[in-house]
Image (cartoon, rainbow, N blue to C red):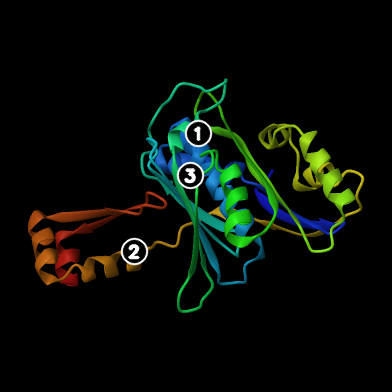
């Protein structure tokens, strides 16, 4: 099933569902992530895509989770076009299971979640709130309430198999709009409480429409749209060359004297190699 993101609304409630299995597994491969890092980054990238669902064409959102746990920092960028990228500062940590599950909260630790919206204006907007659990979904839910005054429910999940590949990943976000009745909100709350974990649903083959059916049980809703999503990075050789040029002639000459240079993109782990002649041509 191709990764996709869909939007729906009904009863004064809007909902977003993202199926992100393939893109999370690609991030896992690119960064050689251990299971805890794969789960943390997968949840964060999925959350970024959900938050970016209503952005305009050229807008971008960045989620940065900085805790005092061994992961250190988890970062994800998502664009309105449905692409996402991300990285973890320490991708290869391992911790004992916590109640039979990956100890993501412990790996993140205490700290802050920072959400930056790049809207094309001169200065981007950044909101920051303390982490409440390090489990990502609860932290995003709390951020939306505290920083943006939006009452939401966010669920995120990533299943990592023993061979380290990601077999299921995704999430949903439900938000009450002005005018939503208490009865509808209670029904939605009951529906969510009765749902299996989102990662289990996706592992069993659920599509976004199946998840909407569960979220809106007893409530008439409309599927607004659905679009493909994917892991994609904006780095390229030309941009890397500009980074090298910005170092200045003295440092470029030093790199050339060493014979060659290799730069790696934080977000996608793509390596860019430059020969001595290519470095000299930039200086």
The quarter in which the C terminus is drawn is: bottom left
Q: Nearer the viewer, mark 3 or mark 1?
A: 1
Looking at the image, tell me whether mark 2 or mark 1 is earlier in sequence order: 1
Front-most of residues 31 and 42 = 42
The label on residue 104 is 1
Mark 1 crowdedness (10 Å alpha carbons): few <14, some 14-19, many ≥20: many
Q: Give the residue pinned by disc 3.
A: 27
The location of residue 216, given as percent across then percent down, is 85, 47
Q: Nearer the viewer, mark 2 or mark 3?
A: 3
Secondary structure beneath label 2: helix
The location of residue 158, given as percent across then percent down, is 59, 36
Farthest-out residue, bottom:
122
Residue 108 vertical placement versus 116 (above, below): above
Looking at the image, tell me whether mark 2 or mark 3 is earlier in sequence order: 3
Front-most of residues 75 and 81 = 75
Query: Residue at position x 76%, y 39% from top?
Result: 206
Instruction: Report if residue 102 is visible in the image.
Output: yes
- 184 with respect to 58 (left or right): right
Query: Residue at position x 24%, y 53% from top?
Result: 262
Q: Quadrant of residue 191?
A: top right
Callout 3–callout 1 Cβ contact below 8 Å: no
The label on residue 203 is none
The label on residue 237 is 2
The location of residue 35, given as percent across then percent down, is 48, 31
Residue 19 vertical placement versus 224 (above, below): above
Q: CA distance from mark 3 to mark 1?
A: 17 Å
Secondary structure beneath label 1: helix
Instruction: Report if residue 17 is visible in the image.
Output: no
């Amino acid at each position: 099933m191709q990764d996709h993101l869909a939007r729906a609304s009904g009863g004064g409630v809007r909902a977003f569902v993202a199926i992100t299995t393939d893109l999370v597994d690609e991030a896992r491969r690119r960064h050689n992530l251990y299971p805890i890092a794969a789960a943390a980054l997968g949840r964060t990238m999925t959350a970024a895509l959900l938050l970016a669902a209503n952005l305009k064409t050229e807008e971008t959102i960045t989620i940065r989770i900085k805790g005092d746990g061994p992961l250190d920092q988890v970062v994800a960028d998502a664009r309105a076009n449905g692409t996402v990228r991300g990285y973890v500062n320490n991708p290869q940590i391992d911790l004992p299971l916590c109640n039979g599950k990956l100890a993501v909260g412990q790996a993140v630790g205490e700290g802050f979640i920072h959400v930056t919206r790049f809207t094309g204006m001169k200065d981007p907007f950044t909101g920051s709130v303390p982490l409440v659990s390090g489990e990502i979904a609860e932290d995003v839910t709390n951020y939306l309430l505290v920083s943006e005054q939006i009452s939401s429910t966010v669920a995120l999940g990533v299943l990592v198999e023993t061979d380290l590949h990601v077999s299921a990943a995704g999430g949903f976000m439900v938000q009450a709009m002005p005018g939503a009745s208490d009865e509808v909100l209670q029904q939605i709350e009951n529906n969510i409480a009765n749902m299996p974990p989102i990662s289990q649903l996706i592992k069993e083959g659920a599509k976004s429409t199946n998840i909407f059916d569960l979220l809106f049980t007893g409530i008439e809703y409309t599927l607004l749209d659905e679009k493909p999503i994917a892991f994609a990075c904006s780095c390229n050789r030309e941009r890397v060359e500009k980074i090298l040029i910005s170092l200045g002639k003295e440092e470029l000459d030093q790199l050339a004297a060493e014979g060659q240079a290799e730069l790696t993109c934080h977000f996608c782990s793509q390596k860019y190699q430059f020969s001595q002649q290519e470095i000299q041509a930039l200086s």
